[in-house]
Amino acid sequence: MKVVERYIMRRAFVLFIGALAWTLTIVWTTQVLTRIDLVTDSGQSALTFFEVAGLILPSIIPIVVPFALVVGVAQTLSVMNVDSELVVINASGASRLTVVRPILILALCASLFSLAVDNGLDPYARQRNRELIANARADFLSLIIQEGTFRKVEDGLFVQIGERFPDNRLGQIFVADSRQEGTELVYYAKNGAVIDKGPLKVLLMSDGIVNRRTQEGDVSVIHFASYAFDLSAFAAAASEATLLPKDQSTSYLLHPDPNDRVFQQQPNAFRAELSQRLSDWLYSLTFALIALAVAGDARSHREARIHPLITAVCIALFVRWLGFFAAGKAVTMPAFNYMIFGVPVVASVVAAWFIYANRRMELPMNWADRLTSLGASVGDGLTNVRLRLSGAAARREGSS
């Protein structure tokens, strides 16, 4: 590899890593915040929460890597053009492959990395995540035995514990059960305990009453000395982790178990997931070609155009949206599996043609005018707000 090629690859790699780190941090934070209820609702430890948070990373890496690559490549080439480095490379007689080759090598490495994560690490992380969440839900004592709070055990079943004593006895037990259509049952007991013997889980309540109300408005009140509320059925259901197509390994997607309940209900979802998993790695190469087609040639500083980074990201977003659209449709319409592969392939061919023909891939200039006017409007609005706030502060100081 030539010195110039190593120089281009090094600059693009540094920007790619920086964009990847920031993008991963932002996306990972938003995903982690949606899992905070694992601690607040089920009483799990912080260690479990951080393990779940760490298992989210493999699922977002294959999506984020292509966008970080297009940002790194487009920004690198744009800065090199501003610094007249691309002009010098062209004037020296070097072919365009001098710029294209290091970018494609970097894109190929990113694609292989995405392929390995998507087909190796991500399924394992998803399965482990499912197990942790299922275990948290199955832990009945940590789920509901918390003083003074209502806990939803399952749809139509709520439990509240007023007191919890050191010897594992419970006080002021309240249970609302509306799982049976047309009938509402409300239990209240002064004390009780949870009996957990293997698969048998029973909430034993004593010295209480049960209110029964039907849909017709009939109400009955029954006093009981002791009452056993069976928890085994939904405790076993909660502990069973249901694996969706996204959670299965690639080898399983190739040869799914015919007795798999999810496969029997949604066979097309398995094919769609397999197609998406085998095509996602292509987007790194596609986005690199798009960035090259947008910002890979030397241009005059006086030439009016939208910033190459904005153009490349907009085109990449549109292409990725088409891929997600095809994957969503393939779940119900198997013909869209061809589109899942076709989107990155066709986009790559189009971008490669622009590079070969030495033509410019860019957004229409009227878009640039609209973006400029929008930016000016936003800037004027922020200036007016700042002036109003400054005037209000001055008036308050004068009145004081």
Image (tube, rainbow, N blue to C red):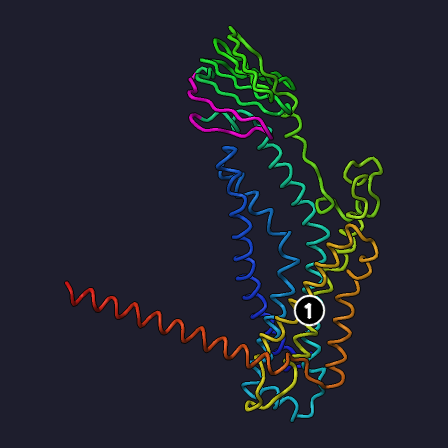
- At x 62%, y 60%, the residue is 64
Seen from this angle, which residue lies furthest top? Answer: 225
Camera-side residue: 373 or 310?
373
Query: Where does the N terminus fall, quadrant-wise?
Result: bottom right
Question: In the rendered image, is residue 336 in sight?
Answer: yes
In-image side of 362 versus 82 (left or right): right
> Looking at the image, is 259 positioned above or below residue 80?
above
Q: Which residues are magenta?
A: 147-166
> Looking at the image, is 215 positioned above or below residue 16?
above
Query: Where does the C terminus fall, quadrant-wise?
Result: bottom left
Magenta span main SS? strand
Q: Position of residue 3 (x, y in %)?
A: 64, 81
- At x 82%, y 42%, the residue is 256
Q: Position of residue 280 (x, y in %)?
A: 72, 59
Q: Position of residue 79 (x, y in %)?
A: 55, 81
> Looking at the image, is 200 positioned above or below residue 63?
above
Q: Position of residue 325 (x, y in %)?
A: 71, 59
Q: Quadrant of residue 115?
A: bottom right
Disc 1 marks a residue whose amino acid type is Ala
Badge 1 crowding class, 10 Å Cα cut-off, few under 14, some 14 to 19, many 20 or more, is many
Question: In the rendered image, is residue 277 in sight?
Answer: no
Camera-side residue: 327 or 380?
380
Quickly name the residue at label 1: 107
Label 1: state its secondary structure: helix
